[in-house]
Amino acid sequence: MSRLIVVSNRVAPITEGEPTAGGLAAGVMDALRQKGGRWFGWSGNVVPDMVTPPLPVVEQRSGPISLYTTDLNQRDYDAYYKGFSNATLWPVFHYQTDLAHFDWAEFEGYRRVNRHFADSLQALMAPQDVVWVHDYHLLCLAEALRAQGARNRIGLFLHIPFPAPAVLMNIPAHAELMAAMCHYDLIGFQTESDRLAFADYVLREMGGEALPGGVLAVGGHAIRTGVYPIGVHVDMLRQEAAAAADSAQVQALRASLGGRALIMSVDRLDYSKGLPQRFTAYERFLADNPGWHRKVEFTQIAVPSRSDVHAYQEIRRELEGEAGRINGRFAELDWTPLRYLNRSFARRDLMPLYAAAQVGLVTPLRDGMNLVAKEFVAAQDPADPGVLVLSRFAGAARELDAALLINPHDEAGTAAALERALSMRLEERRERHAAMMAVMRHNSLERWRDRFECDLRNPASLEHGASAA
Ligand SMILES: O=P(O)(O)OC[C@H]1O[C@H](O[C@H]2O[C@H](CO)[C@@H](O)[C@H](O)[C@H]2O)[C@H](O)[C@@H](O)[C@@H]1O
Ligand SMILES: O=c1ccn([C@@H]2O[C@H](COP(=O)(O)OP(=O)(O)O)[C@@H](O)[C@H]2O)c(=O)[nH]1
């Protein structure tokens, strides 16, 4: 069979046990570990501008995975990653247009890096290989590969939300971007709302036509669209949680809690994750529920992310102030209500921490999926599970509707959900947990990978539409 070539901006660290920054790398690594394949992306290194493309591609092997990485020079990094990807596409696709800026030179840099990726890929691809591209950094990659003559089947999976057309059109280059995306054979989304938003633009703004089964005909191309919610390896995560249940780290946590209930959150330090709103909702919970003082602690792990982008520096400053203010208001000599950690953990070390928590608090303002929500559920002991409090604006909420769903802008509602979660009877906790586990077992990571790969490889399913979500 032809090989699978995976392309993404971020690749997972190949060394076992290193922290994986972000759900894309964690998900793709887990998905490739079983079947193997080639994975191409940015090394994470930035080199001076005097080093000009084509930059060398370095190969590393890890079991069945061949990892190929390349550096970016400073100019390309600034325009492509820091600029158009993370200061234009990321905020607009997460509906935070107030935080977005746009610069045609950065857009040109973004297209240039997509072309460099295409150049490097040519050496790794045979004509019969299928190419699976990931995420918003590479919306123009299929167009660049086609311009070089590639006839391979090329699919894109978008890990983040796709915005409504009126929001997308805030980007002055929206027409160029959408025209480039139409060079993919298959585009996968996390939720049906994301898919519908994309189709809406194609139909209304590009004069496209909707054919049965999620196929869109536009400008002589037929693009298949489908919904492929990314999942997790439930059993592997449960094992990770159980294996380290008595680790020194967990023992230290338990000792410091001294029997108090634990509310736990883990995020990249990103404005889309709703951390300021979460902190004030916890403050409201403490103010409304003096009976819970000294009986509960909230631990927020916030991993620094994209720290050279202005909006990320701002949110970091804001949160440091908020954490200090809330502790200043409620702390006692023997009780710190909020612990705020700015560091990353290896995922296998996070799993027993989730397991030790009574409540997982996951409240993004918008999120493509949010794998932390799924990992929290997988880590729980089915006999005595903790409760997930989840934003309705996370892609995960479409599947995990047995969580306590909240609106992160509703401080009082989130505070009330926290109280409800902490007080929930065992029977209800078990029922909710079992319902979420059943969905997660069905929509597993294997299913995500297999359905996308099968739909990408199989043009025949064009007539029948993408496989059922
Ligand atoms: O690569 P970085 O700039 O350091 O950012 C980390 C990743 O963040 C985003 O993750 C998304 O993918 C997850 C898995 O599908 C999903 O659960 C989450 O909701 C998304 O935000 C980003 O999309 C990745 O490209 C980044 O690597
Ligand atoms: O210190 C950390 C914090 C997070 N993660 C992992 O990073 C991923 C975050 O993915 P998610 O989909 O929740 O959000 P993203 O960061 O991709 O937007 C999850 O697999 C986490 O377990 C990690 O390995 N170490």
Image: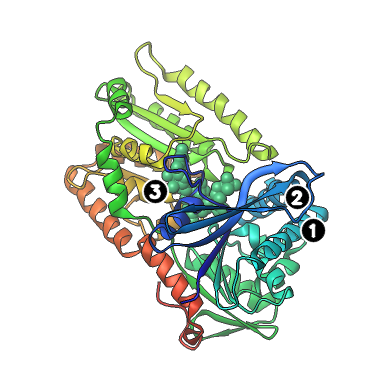
Q: Residue at x 23, y 55 (%)?
A: 434
Q: Which mark is residue 373?
A: 3
Q: Amino acid at mark 2?
A: Asp
Relative vertical location of residue 321 with respect to residue 383 in this rendering, above or below: above
Q: Can the viewer see residue 58?
A: yes
Circle 3 — which element? helix
Q: CA distance from mark 2 to mark 3?
A: 34 Å
Mark 1 or 3, nearer chain start? 1
Which quadrant of the view contains residue 290? top left
Q: How is the image coloured?
A: rainbow
Which quadrant of the view contains residue 124? bottom right
Q: Which residue lies under the disc numbered 2?
A: 76
Q: Which mark is residue 108?
A: 1
Relative vertical location of residue 424 with respect to residue 297 in this rendering, above or below: below
Circle 2 — which element? helix
* Residue depth check, mark 2 versus mark 3: number of the one nearer the observer: 2
* Residue depth check, mark 1 versus mark 2: number of the one nearer the observer: 2
Q: CA distance from mark 1 to mark 3?
A: 36 Å
Q: Amino acid at mark 3?
A: Ala
Mark 2: few, some, or many residues within 10 Å (few <14, many ≥20)?
many
In the image, 253 versus 416, the foreground residue is: 253
Circle 1 — which element? helix
| Spot occupied by residue 26 in the image (x, y as percentages of width and height) | 46, 50
Is the CB of mark 3 within 8 Å of ligand 2? Answer: yes
Q: Quick one: quadrant of the C terminus?
A: bottom left
Is disc 2 in contact with disc 3, using a CB cutoff of under 8 Å? no
| Spot occupied by residue 9 in the image (x, y as percentages of width and height) | 61, 54
